[in-house]
Amino acid sequence: MTVLIITHSNDNESISRVMQAVKNQGGKAFRFNTDRFPTEATLDIYYQKGYERLILVDDTEQLDLSDVTSVWYRRLAIGARIPTTMDVQLRQASIKESRATIQGMIASIKGFHLDPLENIRKAENKQLQLQVARELGIDTPRTLTTNNPKAVREFIQECKQVVTKMLSAFAVYDEQGQEKVVFTNTVTSEDLKDLESLQYCPMTFQEKIPKALELRTIIVGKHIFTAAVDSQALEMARDDWRKKGIALLKAWQSYQLPQEVENKLLRLMAYFGLNYGAIDIILTPDGHHVFLEVNPVGEFFWLEKYSGLPISDAIAKILCSR
């Protein structure tokens, strides 16, 4: 069994944990750091009638891609080390061609994929996630995505308390180059004075759900692992626990979802054709579980490290058994 892990050099310890788990299963794991391509890692893809050769070399390790039995798709950072001193147009062309090369390589591997890229891309659509979840009977917040100030004011009147978030993951950088991550935030009266700026960028508004706990559920195949944290214990974490994520790392504890909720989440995963997903859920003070989103390549390492959930073993088992 040979597992190819698609990631980058700065990925977290989840990689080493799964690699060790694969080894414990009797398999071999090859780590491909995509930021090293094309400047340091090499790839040969050769086809002729009745013969093909696909050889990947990264950090002196060589892999014959015909030996790969499964692929774990984690992260892409293709072309990250291409010099920024290059002409901008040429650098973008290089990145685009490198990305097409690697994506073609991934698609050509005949083994099991955790998960197929087309399934991941479909599942990343958060509007579709909420629609499917509602159809499956999963509780979701009232949600409005719009560039219309009038619709926002009406929505706030309807919901009373509202948070705002983005559909895509990104950061903005200040003049000093410091990263400013866009978190979920409560909409204030001051924010309402600037709604006309929606003409330049739509935003997503969601009713503010009261929180007893915030949950992260990791699904690997049919295995479900859930942990909970009291994000309301820290003022800065109440809207978005990630604002104080480091301070809360050790506060996460194992949690058991109701069987009915787990069954609905498995049906959601099946709709998108996912074998892996990281799902965010709110437990309300009156005991309801409210679905927020599923990240098809979401993080899990801190849950395993501090809550003892055997997620790496589950990932390794599905990669080695398929």
Image (spheres, rainbow, N blue to C red):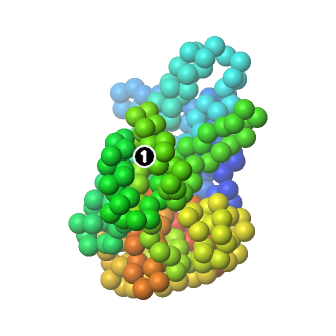
In the figure, residue 199 lies in which quadrant? Answer: top left
x and y percentages locating residue 274 in the rendered image = 38, 60
Residue 141 left/right relative to 197: left
144 on left or right of 81: left
The residue lying toward the viewer, choosing from 64 and 39, is 39
Asked where in the image residue 206 lies, by quadrant, the reply is: bottom left
* Residue for point 43% across, 38% down: 196
Rendering coords of residue 187 (x, y %): 50, 56
Where, quadrant-wise, is the C terminus in this rendering?
Answer: bottom left
Between 51 and 173, the residue placed more toward the observer is: 173
Query: Residue at position x 69%, y 60% from top?
Result: 13
| Mark 1, secondary structure of its residue | strand
Q: Residue furthest right?
A: 176
- Side of 157 where 283 appears, left or right: right
Between 297 and 15, the one nearer to me in the picture = 297
Q: Amino acid at mark 1?
A: Met
Q: Is residue 234 among what the camera can see?
A: yes
In the image, residue 285 sits, relative to residue 223, either above or below, namely below
**Residue 72 vertical placement versus 8 (above, below):** below
Residue to which mark 1 is pinned: 203
Q: How many marks?
A: 1
In the rendered image, residue 171, in percent from the top left (x then y), is placed at 60, 43
Q: Is residue 55 left or right of residue 234?
A: left
Most foreground residue, 23 or 32: 32
Q: Residues within 10 Å of mark 1 (few under 14, many from 20)?
A: some
* Residue drawn at (68%, 31%) of the image: 81
Residue at 53%, 74% (x, y): give it: 214
Position above or below: 288 against 109? below
